[in-house]
Amino acid sequence: MSAKAAIGSPARPVNRVLITASVMAASIMQAIDTTIANIALPRMQGSLSGTQDQMVWVLTSYIVATAIMTPLAAWLAVRVGRKRVFFTSVISFTIASALCGMATSLAEIVVFRTFQGLAGAALLPLSQAILLDINPKERHGRAMAIWGMGVVLGPIVGPLLGGWLTEDYSWRWVFLVNVPFGILAAIGIAATLPETQPKRSTFDLFGFAMLSIGVGALQLMLDRGELKDWFASTEIRIEALVATLGLFLFIAHMLTTEHPFISRALFKDRNFVIGNVFIFMVGTVLFATLALLPAMMQGLMGYPVLTAGLVMAPRGVGTWVAMAVVGRLAGRVDARWLIAVGFGLAAISLAQMAALSPQTDAEPLITSGVLQGFGSGLAYVALTIVSFVTLPAHLRDEGAAFFNLTRNIGSSIGISCIQAYVTSGTSRAHAHLTEQLTPFNAAAVQQQVLQPLDTTAGIAALNHVVDVQAGWIAYVNAFHVMMLLTVVVIPLILFARGAKQGRKASQVAPE
């Protein structure tokens, strides 16, 4: 029996609205938690008496645990039942959030964050599969628009919500705020979500172990690379070696074993493979932008935390509008065109960001953010439709898990690589600008530093001016790189099938 048949016929849905509300409450809760704790780290560091290096583990433990557990969610849903896995994940995530909020030491919060990451990993992929199953294919656009709102808006809302809770209450409320929403989501899931029929399924322990080791080591390397000066560190070199070896053994094993942990059938679906390339790029560009802008606004423009969050917030409005629009257009307009337009708008917004300067006020940041939010929302929903339209129903749980894992890895690689690019670019620009300082342009420099250049204060002020200018050059170059990456991937959509072709293909595909 397929998952679709087990959960109920789309023509005769069971509490579709309540199921959607319940699973989305859980998904949004998990999506917000990927970024909400970042803003509270300085307060947590003071409260828990940790060093900067130690505090990074509060984020790293969650990221690594989520990455390892995400692929396992599909197997558990098939073997145990989707409702049991989803309900248990929500309850466990809620308990872990409460424990994080009550932690009294750094060791405790790292352990509880690991538990939180393990518990929440199944929420996004299974919620996506559930919404696809309880809706007929002609409603998949609207369903994925609702799902995408939670996934895309979570990282945008997280820093703003985290900053408000930390400033006005306590860093503990960054975690405790999940408790009431988790309880409501669990009640809704228990009351409305039908159970799928569990199936006996072979568990590929070696494949799972190699994938977990490879992905876990990769996430550690990416998350700690900048802190450890990348490959100058023995730790990073070891993690890179372990990640490479683990992923190589996983791929070799998957191609040769009879029952691999991730089905080879997923990679025979052209749309699904192309969709994963695009979602990887969405993770790389969108989440890297979300990581760069707050640091740029606070470090170079002098914005307070809450002001930076408010300037970022309108991009969420753009995303909401796009997803409301694409949900209605999905059945009338070829989803491939929506993806191309969405990526095109995102590229234009990055070009606008690359034109920013030290004299820039908040208006260009807001307008480019709204445009990127609109483009990302447009592409994200259409991309989900194209990726799953040709995929048989019995592969949806597994496909959704891999789809979300690809996005998470893309975001980790994008954030780490772009931040490293900005750091190294700032150093190069600083060295180049310093070379250009001569007695002949001292008068112009004097107007900016407002200090005598033959004093310690004057030299420090001059160095600050050079730092700011070098930072702007590095950020502008980073936005150019992301714009080029966005443009280069667009032609790939021509190789995907349209939604109508995909429906015909999926109807004849064996399940």
Image: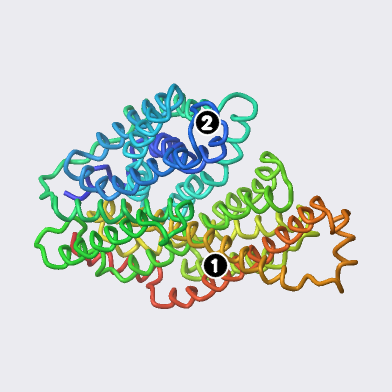
Disc 1: which residue: 343
Q: Position of residue 33 (x, y in %)?
A: 47, 39
Q: Position of residue 431 (x, y in %)?
A: 66, 68
Does residue 356 appear to the left or right of 477 in the view shown? right
Question: For the point 50% across and 67% down, which residue is it?
Answer: 339
Quick one: 447 or 487, which is closer to the camera? 447
Does residue 314 appear to the left or right of 439 in the view shown? left
Disc 2: which residue: 44
Q: Is residue 117 visible?
A: yes
Q: CA distance from mark 1 to mark 2?
A: 38 Å
Question: For the point 22% across and 54% down, which residue is it?
Answer: 394
Q: Is residue 332 above or below residue 213?
A: below
Q: Is residue 184 visible?
A: no
Q: Is residue 442 above or below residue 123?
A: below
Question: For the point 59% across and 30% down, which residue is it?
Answer: 166
User: How would you rate the neighbour count of disc 1 (Cα within 10 Å): few for under 14, some for 14-19, many for 20 or more?
Assistant: many
Is there a contact, CB below 8 Å, between mark 1 and mark 2? no
Quick one: 184 or 276, which is closer to the camera? 276
Question: For the point 44% across and 55% down, which residue is it?
Answer: 225
Quick one: 362 or 234, which is closer to the camera? 234
- Earlier residue among tags 1 and 2: 2
The colour scheme applied to this rendered structure is: rainbow
**Residue type at tag 2:** Met
Mark 1 or 2: in front is 2
Q: Position of residue 328 (x, y in %)?
A: 53, 56
Quick one: 246 or 410, which is closer to the camera? 246
Q: Position of residue 44 (x, y in %)?
A: 52, 31
Query: Circle 1 sits in a helix, a strand or a loop, which is it?
Result: helix
Q: Quadrant of the C terminus?
A: bottom left
**Residue type at tag 1:** Phe
Query: Circle 2 sits in a helix, a strand or a loop, which is it?
Result: helix
